[in-house]
Amino acid sequence: MTLQADVSDLWQRYDDDDVDAETATADDHDTLDAFLDALEAGEVRAAEKRGGEWEANEWVKQGILLNFGLRATEARAYGGVDYHDVLPLRETSDLGERGTRNTPDGTTIRRGAYLGADCIMMSPSFVNVGAHVGDGTLVDSCDTVGSCAQIGENVKLGANTLIGGVLEPVEDAPVIVEDGVSLGAGCRVTSGFVVGENTVVGENTLLSPRIPVYDLVEEEVIYGRLPPERRAFTRMVESSIGDHDLFAGGAYKPAVVAMDIEAETRDATKREEALRE
């Protein structure tokens, strides 16, 4: 059987209440471990682009959930730190072989996360299970890359950026940040939002399907995605409760404005190759 078939079979047994953390066998745990190994090697991903559209791989998400449902919380130790979890942290010996570096005292990579070649992960930062971080990407200080998030190649995640996860609450699609994106410090990307390639996003911008994107290039209002090749930032627009008595000066809500990207903006966000030599 293939890994996908093994995971799907195990999921069916779990869904039918035929196996749990107490009754899972050594073979079941071998399947779970093989699945995590495949995630860490980049051989399987929680979502992939097919025909120009991102699609979630349901069986991969099932495999991740099985690693919680069929494991007990254990006392663990890593790097002199004691903690309790169902999963250990990821071994990092393979990162140096690919030119990827993670700085000490606070870079945490959970089992089942993938980091590509020539990545930089600054402390403190956290990459969760199922996340996929592409080649040449910078994960800066105080960043969180949530479960199953798909981060492209040569992406810059500014300091204190949050990339939302997908396991709790359970949602169909993970956050997608495509190749060449630059997210300014303090950005938040949540709830399966897709950031198109080579887009530059200003500091402290919240990207969520519930917040409208005013695309001034195509002159349309869209939700859940930023088109490629845009410069985006937050602006306040009039709210539907603007005439409420409690808001004497008018009520406003956040929106995202997307414009053509200028050459000087692209130059200001280009990656520094010296950091990766």
Image: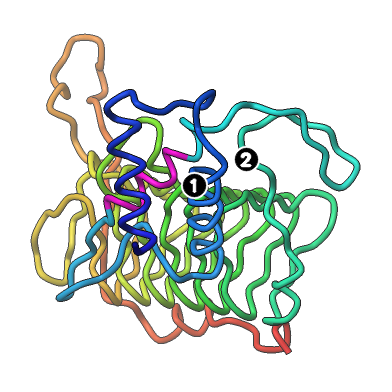
Q: Is residue 159 found inside the magenta-colored segment of the image?
A: no
Q: Where does the image place residue 201, in percent across and percent down from the top left?
A: 41, 62
**Which comes before the other along the chain, label 2 or label 1?**
2
- Residue 222 against residue 51 in the figure, above or below: above
Vertical comparison of 78 with 15: above or below: below
The one of 136 and 215 positioned closer to us in this rendering = 136
Q: Amino acid at mark 2?
A: Leu
Q: Residue at x 54, y 23 (%)?
A: 22
Residue type (three-letter) at the residue carrying disc 1: Gly
Colour scheme: rainbow
Identify the residue shown where x is 66% and y is 53%.
109
Q: Are marks 2 and 1 in contact (CB under 8 Å)?
A: no
Residue at (15% x, 21% y) in the render: 241
Residue 206, given in percent of the width and then of the height, sits at: 38, 46
List the residue tagged with mark 1.
146
Give me the disc on residue 87: 2
Q: Which residues are magenta?
A: 58-66
Residue 227 screen position, x and y as percent: 23, 68
SS of the residue under disc 1? loop
